[in-house]
Image (tube, rainbow, N blue to C red):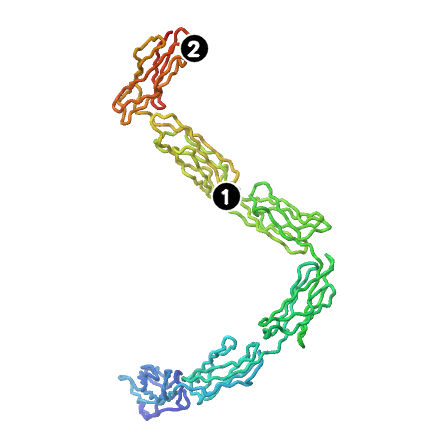
Amino acid sequence: MLFAVLAMSFSGIASAVTLSFSAPDGRVEAGSGMKATLSLPLPTTKPIELSVKSSHPSVATVPSRVTIAQRSSRVAFTINTAKGLSSDTTVTITVDTVPSNPKVPPVKGTLRVLREAQVSSITFEPAQVTSGQAATGKVALSRAAAVGGVSVPLQSPDASILRLPASVSVPAGSTFTNFKVIAPTVTQPRNIAVQAPLGGIVPFGVLRVEPAPLEITALMLPAEVVSEGPAGQGRITLNRPVNTTFSDPITLSSDNANVTVNASVVGRSGNTVITFPITVRNIPAGAPSVPFKIRANLGTSIKSATSNAVGRQVVVDRIAVPPTQSVVSGQDPKEGQVYLNIASLEPIVVLLTSSSPNLEVPATVKVPANQIMATFPVIGTGLATGAPSVTAALGARLEGGTQRTVNVSVRSPDALVARVEAPATILSDGPPQSGRVTLEGPSQSVTSVALRSNFQQLSVPTSVAIPAGQTVGTFALSASGLAEGMRPISATISASTPVPGSAVRTATVSVTAPPPSITIRELTFSPAGPLSAPSSTTGTVTLSAPAPAGGTSVFIGVVQGHSFTSVSPNSVTVAAGATTARFQVNVTTDIRSDASGTPMDAGLGCISTRIGAQTGVRACISVGK
C-alpha cells in the first residue's frame, strides 16, 4: 500500500501514524470511489476529531471531519472522484488534528485520478455466425483499468433485433472484457454494428449474421376433427420468415384414407406460419374415434403429429328462455327451449341445471326423435316484492358432454296499486288536501307510483314514492281557476306503477267553485199579473250589493210554463256599481199543460234566476187566455 509515515510522540511513545488507500498503486478511475484509512500505533483514551482536506476538491471529495472513537486506533472514510476529467490529476489528501483535541501529527497521502479510458477495439469471435448462434464480443481498452474498473456502454443501430448488455465492465488491472450475444433471426445476410462510445471516441465492431436454413420447427394439429364437419386446421411453424416470394413446397401426407390434406403447401415471403385444412369423411356418428398421423417434409426437415377423427356427435347447441331471458318470481312458468346441433334417430335426454334456488327447472328434458328442440317449464320463486333481481346460470348438456349455459334474470314481483283515495270534494283556490295510494303489498325497495289528473284545474304530483316495507303513500292535491258560483266539476285521479299490463286505479273528486260574494235578493215583474195572452212583462232582478268591476252575469230560465212562457235574453249583466238589471217575459196565446200538452184556460209561468251555481231566486206570474 501507498502510505505516509511521520514520527510522532503519542502518549509519551515515539510512534508512526499512517494514511493508506485501497488503490494498490495509488491510481483510481475518475468517477470511482476509494477507501482511505488513518491508523494510530495505540488505541486512544478518548475520541479524537480530525480534519480531512483534498488538494483538488473538484476532482476528489472527502468528508470535512472524521473521528477516531475512544479505545480505537483507526478510522476509515471514503474518497469520491469526479467524472469527465480532461487529463490525469494528482490529488493530495491531508489529515490533521482539530484544535483542542490531543495532538496527532498531520499525515498526507497522494492519489492519481485517471481521466476516462478509451476503447481501442471491438471484435467478435467468430466474426460470422448463423441466426440463433452465439458469438463472443471483446472490448479492449487503450490502457489497463485502475481501481473502480471501467464501465463501457454498448450500443447498436440494430438494437431492435440484437440484444446487447447496456454496458460491460473492464475490471481493475485488465485491458479488456468479453460479453456474449445471440445472433438475431435474419432473412438476408446482414452486417450488424456494435459501438462503444467512451472518452469522446466511438469505435465499433461488426458481426456478420447469415440466415439459418429454412426448417420446420413444429407441426400442430387440432385435438380432433369431426367427420362431415368443418375442416380442422393444421399449423406448420418455420424457424424463420421466408426470404423469397415462396418457400420450397412442403409435402403433406396422411396415414388414414378417411383423412384428407393438401398434397403440398408453400410459405409466403415474410411468414413463419403456414396453415392447411384437414377434412374427415365416412366416420359413422357414435363410432369410436380413429387416430391419424399427418407428416410434413421440407428437404431434410421432417415433422409429424397425430390427432383423432371422430364421428359426427349430437351435442347441445344452445339453451334459451325467450324472448328476454328473464322470469318473474311467483308468476306462471315461462317456456325454456333447448336445441341440439342435429336431429337424432332416437330420443335424446338433456340434463338441466340451475345455479340458483330462485330459478327452478326440471332435472331433464327429452328431445323427441328426429327433432332438434324441446321445451320445459322455467319458474322464478322465492323473491319478495321489490327484492333485487338474481342472475342464475341455466345449463343444459348431454351425459358426458359439454354444457351450454344462458344467464337468466329472476326478477321480483312488481308492486301493484290496490287503490287510490281522495277527498270527495275540493274547493277551488282552497287549502290543499291529502290523497292516499295503497299498494297490494309491501315492497323491499322504494315504489314509485305515477299520478295523473284528467282536469287541468285539479293539480296532483306526477308521482308519489312509497318507502320500502310500507304500503301507503300520501300526496297533496289542490284546485284553482274556477270562477265564483260555477257548477262543480267531476275530475278523476289515476294511479299506476310502471308494470306492463298492471291495473290503473282511479278516484273521483268534485271540484267546487267558491261561493259568489254577491247573491240575488229578489225577482219582480211589472206588471205583476195576472196577464192575458198574448202579452209581456218586464222582469227585474235585484242583487244584494252593487256589482263589481266587469259586472255580474245573471242566468235566467223558465222553470214552469215552458209551453207558453219564454224569456229574452237568457242572461243579463248587472253593470259595475249597479244592483238591478231587466229582461223581458213573453206570454203566448197557446196555453198548454207542460206535462200532457192539454190546452188550458190559465197557467202559471215561473221564472228562475241564478248567479253561477248558486241556488236561484224564483218568481211566478199568472196567465190566462
Quarter containing the C terminus: top left
Q: Residue furthest left?
A: 577
Q: Position of residue 128 (x, y in %)?
A: 56, 84
Who is closer to the viewer here, 252 or 473? Answer: 252
Q: How many marks?
A: 2
Q: Which residue is tagged 1? A: 386
Residue drawn at point x = 35 percent, y = 24 percent: 612
N-terminal-most mark, 2 or 1: 1
- Residue 90 appears at what percent x and percent y? 35, 89
Q: Judge whether 118 appears above or below 463 on screen.
A: below
Mark number, residue 189: none
User: Which residue is found at the position 72% from the left and 56% from the top?
Assistant: 285
Real-space CA distance between mark 2 and mark 1, rounded to the nearest whole angstrom: 68 Å
What residue sits right under mark 2 in the picture? 593
Percent position (x, y) of residue 493? 44, 33
Left or right of 328? Residue 111 is left
Question: Under tag 1, what secondary structure?
Answer: loop
Does 473 sit above or below residue 533? below
Mark 2 is on which residue type?
Answer: Ser
Residue in the foreground of this view, choosing between 250 and 234: 250
Using the rendered image of the protein, determine whether residue 77 is visible from the camera's viewpoint. Answer: no
Q: Amino acid at mark 1?
A: Gly
Q: Is residue 39 placed above or below 416 in the rendered structure?
A: below
Q: Where residue 245 sits in the image (x, y, percent)? A: 60, 73
Name the mark nearer the viewer: 2 or 1. 2
In-image side of 431 versus 152 (left or right): left
- Rendered-image quadrant of the N terminus: bottom left
Label pair 2/1, CB-CB below 8 angstroms: no
Q: Nearer the viewer, residue 317 or 588?
A: 588
